Amino acid sequence: DEIIMEKYSHVRVIGEGSFGRAVLVLCRNTQDKYVLKEIQLPKNQSKLQSSRREAVLLSRMKHPNIVAYREAFEGDGLLCIVMEYCNGGDLLQRIQQQKSSQFTVENILKWFAQMCAGAKHIHDKRVLHRDLKSKNIFLTDDGSVKLGDFGSACVLNSSKAYAQAYVGTPYYVAPEIWDNKPYNNKSDVWSLGCVLYELCTLRHPFQASSWKSLILKVCRGAYPPLPNHLPYELHYLIKHMFKTNPKDRPSVHTILTSHRISRLLRSHL
Ligand code: ADP
Ligand code: MG
């Protein structure tokens, strides 16, 4: 904590995970707020590299819809990543606050277009996020969304993209992952489809009381139909994002440029 204290002062803990915690801090010089993510560094050398990957990959991103990296430092067995603070909290909290009143179509399209723009930036840099979910998407006070938590991200086609034991929440995991196929850019598209569906219905598309029946539903691509009042383009898009064969799913680039919904989305960017 001593390194932190020199430059930043602790305000409050805003998130706690399995690897550490996210703390809201104040920069002593500028009085600006940041989030400092503390990650417990493992002693094991190869695991050490993968812990550092989060900071390395986040630092390569520069986009209005991705949480901005500021700096990272290590000490006392901790890796600290300092990043932009999104004061609207995460999208999961926002969805839960919504209770039963639905988001407007305008709102859904705007947020989804921004998520796609962020994801496109990540994929263009040949990086996969691998943990896209409403809890890892943050809101700013101007009402826009930013992708965060690069703790599972990896470089495309690296051996790390293969056969990595899955940790985390299972609702957003694409069928090919359950089938032990390598993670690819279309697996991120599946997860974004899950977030889009959540925005449309306030529910997960694939939900079950056991792992086994959840995986079965995911691998069949069987989800409850969207409400009828939503525009045809959204029904059509969700259907494509939930194609069980990743080859049949659109890339984020396609969604933003040549899908039936592209013009509608771009008008919200
Ligand atoms: P973990 O690896 O533990 O999931 P995250 O980076 O997702 O770590 O952070 C955990 C939680 O802390 C998030 O779900 C979010 O609620 C909050 N959080 C993290 N980073 C930020 C940020 N930059 N702005 C606002 N909230 C954040
Ligand atoms: Mg997270």
Image: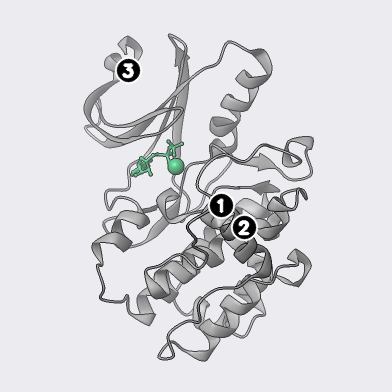
Give the residue type that dot 3 points to.
Answer: Ile
Give the residue type that dot 1 points to.
Answer: Trp
Pointer 2: residues within 10 angstroms few (<14), some, or many (20+)? many
Residue found 63% across the figure and 66% down from its top: 252
Q: In the picture, residue 134 is in which quadrant?
A: bottom left
Whole-percent x, y for residue 135 in the image: 41, 50
Mark number, residue 211: 1
Residue found 75% across the figure and 39% down from its top: 163
For mark 3, give the secondary structure: helix
Q: Which circle's residue, 2 or 3, is located before the other in the chain?
A: 3
Above or below 219: residue 128: above
How far apart marks 1 and 2 lie (CA) works out to: 6 Å
Which of these two is toward me, 207 or 1? 207
Which corner quadrant holds the N terminus? top left
Residue found 66% across the figure and 54% down from its top: 123
Cβ atoms under marks 1 and 2 closer than 8 Å: yes
Give the residue type that dot 2 points to.
Answer: Ile
33 lies left or right of 62: left
Q: Mark 2 points at which residue?
A: 215
Depth check, mark 3 against mark 1: the one in front is: 1
Q: In the picture, residue 139 is in which quadrant?
A: bottom left
Above or below 160: residue 223: below
Pointer 3: residues within 10 angstroms few (<14), some, or many (20+)? some
